[in-house]
Image (spheres, rainbow, N blue to C red):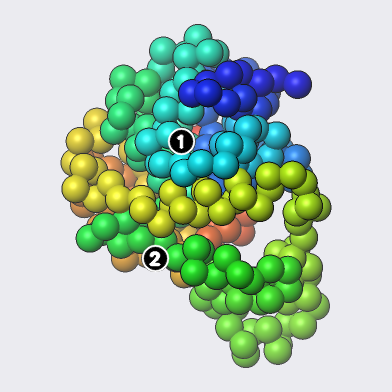
Amino acid sequence: MPTVHVNGLDIYFERAGEGPPLLFISGTGGDLRNKPNQFDGPLARAFDLVSHDQRGLGRSGKPDRPYSMADYADDAAGLMAHLGWDQAHVVGVSFGGMVAQELALRHPARIDRLVLACTSPGGAGGASYPFHEIEHLTGEARAKHLIPISDSRRDAAWATANPETYAQLVALGSADPFAEEPGRRQGAHRQLEARKDHDTWDRLGDIAAPTLIAAGRYDGVALPETQEKMAVRIPGATLGFFEGGHLFMLQDRAAVPAMVEFLSG
């Protein structure tokens, strides 16, 4: 099992593909055992793709102590150092985009080109949806709560008009095959603690890497207006909106190829 000892814990990672190095940083609750994932799309065909289970998640270490966004960024930098990557492209999705912001600020020389997908800077720039406030919701209750937030088009009227699709989304959002693993709940909780304190807004102007901000037009987690604010704040950033909500990378077939094109530029 490929692991690296970084910052006092073991980080599990996977690697596939050939080409320029690319680190993919996944979102809240990300676990590489959940399939399909980032290795099943265009990124693994265009790059030497590496992704990891972040601290508290999946097969990585789950120390029961407070985590910070700086910890997550330093974990990513440590993994890159282990791989011998002095510099690489980085794609950060949702929570992973928050980590990628910290990585770009704390370790600027390690990033070639940067994609921030469906994410937020926090602070005065706007935070993503406060998942820590619904931590008590599980299973179907959580899934039903988040469906119209993840994609604002999927309101109650839409659910009534599309019962089969709605039922599929509820089932998908309810599934957590690893819920009872030791440390699973505490690790997820520690991630949410760190996430709620994320704030890079006043430092975004220091991001030097060429940056693409990619977002869904109907995302109620990382709001479209927040993406516009980030695009103004990050020097030279490109902003791209796609047809979809928080999962626009799955909903709009043009999204990931647009990222590949940007990273290959």
In the image, what residue occupies the spot 53% across and 49% down? 190
Determine crowd level at label 1: few under 14, some 14-19, many 20+ residues with C-alpha closer than 10 A: many
Q: Is residue 121 above or below residue 212?
A: below
Which residue is found at the position 52% from the left and 48% from the top? 191
Q: Return the residue found at the far top.
A: 84
> Does any portion of residue 128 appear in the rendered image?
yes
* Location of residue 237 by image quarter: top left
Quadrant where the image shows the C terminus? top left
* Amino acid marked by disc 2: Leu
Q: Which residue is mark 2?
A: 223
In the picture, the disc for residue 72 is 1
Q: Give the amino acid at mark 1.
A: Tyr
Q: How many marks?
A: 2
Residue 117 makes an appearance in the image: no
Tell me what residue is drawn at x 41 percent, y 17 percent.
87
> Residue 198: horizontal and vertical position, in percent?
36, 50
Query: In front here: 209 or 46?
Result: 209
Q: CA distance from mark 2 to mark 1?
A: 23 Å
Residue at the spot 48% in from the left edge and 28% down from the top edge: 75
Q: Horizontally, is 27 left or right of 220 in the view?
A: right
